Amino acid sequence: MLDGKPLKLSVAGISAAHHSSHRFLGSSAIPVRNFLDYEKHLQQNGVIIRPAKRQEKISAELEAYAKRGSYRIHEDASLRKLVAYLNEYPTAIQGISIRPF
């Protein structure tokens, strides 16, 4: 989008338009007017576009799990960063660690 209008271009047979879409979680046609609109609508459709916001979400969810279950968090900044870049909408889940005897 430039000045509220889609650019006249196409990549891999897909032309620029006034909408976006999400393959798995969201709507098949997400209206877009500008970047802030794009960011808001994508978040509503299961995509956090800013990696820093993804890392904040991961941290907040880990802290909530730790508080509820009296757990300790093993801090691993590189793993957290990796997860933030691998997922559009990361969600913390509880797992178990099995150690060999």
Image (cartoon, grey):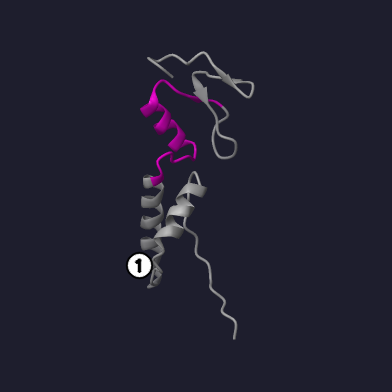
Compared to residue 24, the image places residue 35 above or below, namely above
**Which quarter shows the N terminus?**
top left
The answer to if 47 sits in the magenta stretch is yes
Residue at the image point whose x is 49% and y is 36% from the top: 45
Q: Secondary structure at mark 1?
A: helix
Q: Position of residue 87 (x, y in %)?
A: 51, 47
Q: Which residue is mark 1?
A: 67
Residue at the image point whose x is 56% and y is 40% from the top: 25
Q: Which residue sits furthest right?
A: 13
Q: Residues within 10 Å of mark 1 (few under 14, many from 20)?
A: few
Compared to residue 4, the image places residue 96 above or below, namely below
Q: Position of residue 42 (x, y in %)?
A: 46, 34
For the residue pair 94 and 87, the one nearer the viewer reads as 87
Q: Which corner quadrant of the image does residue 99 belong to?
A: bottom right
Q: Which residue sits furthest bottom?
A: 101
The answer to if 45 sits in the magenta stretch is yes
- Which stretch is magenta? 29-51
Residue at the image point whose x is 52% and y is 13% from the top: 8
**Which quarter shows the C terminus?**
bottom right
Q: Which corner quadrant of the image does residue 3 belong to?
A: top left
Q: Which amino acid, by three-letter code, is at mark 1?
A: Lys
Number of numbered labels in the structure image = 1
Q: Position of residue 72 (x, y in %)?
A: 38, 72
Q: Position of residue 14 (x, y in %)?
A: 60, 22
Q: Is residue 78 left or right of residue 23?
A: left
